[in-house]
Amino acid sequence: MGRNHHKLKNNLEEFRRAAGLTQQDLSQKAEVSRKSINAIENGIYVPSTVLALKIAKTLKCKVEDLFKLPL
């Protein structure tokens, strides 16, 4: 993880809720633990590229919709 990861804007919870999924639902579809989804949503953990792509695919959006760096 880079040292500036705390600046990463994270929209995962909003997209997950809009899709009508619980953390558990998303974790099963993305093949990761519910705790990982929770940690990502709370900015504790930055997902790998592969996991970010899996989550975006599950939520039918782009990785850039979920995670952004400030301008």
Image (tube, rainbow, N blue to C red):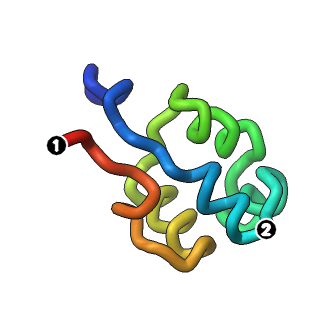
Which residue occupies 57% across, 39% down?
40
Q: Residue furthest bottom?
A: 60
Q: Which residue is mark 2?
A: 20
Percent coordinates x, y for residue 68 in the rendering:
32, 49
Q: Image height check: is 70 above or below 13?
A: above
Label 2 crowd bin: few (<14), some (14–19), many (20+), radius 10 Å: few
Q: Which residue is mark 1?
A: 71
Percent coordinates x, y for residue 71 in the rendering:
16, 43
- Quarter of the figure with residue 27: bottom right
Mark 1: which amino acid?
Answer: Leu
Out of 65 and 46, give the one closest to the viewer.
65
- Quarter of the figure with residue 35: top right
Which residue occupies 67% across, 60% down?
16
Which residue occupies 60% across, 61% down?
15
Mark 2: which amino acid?
Answer: Gly
Mark with earlier residue (1, 2): 2
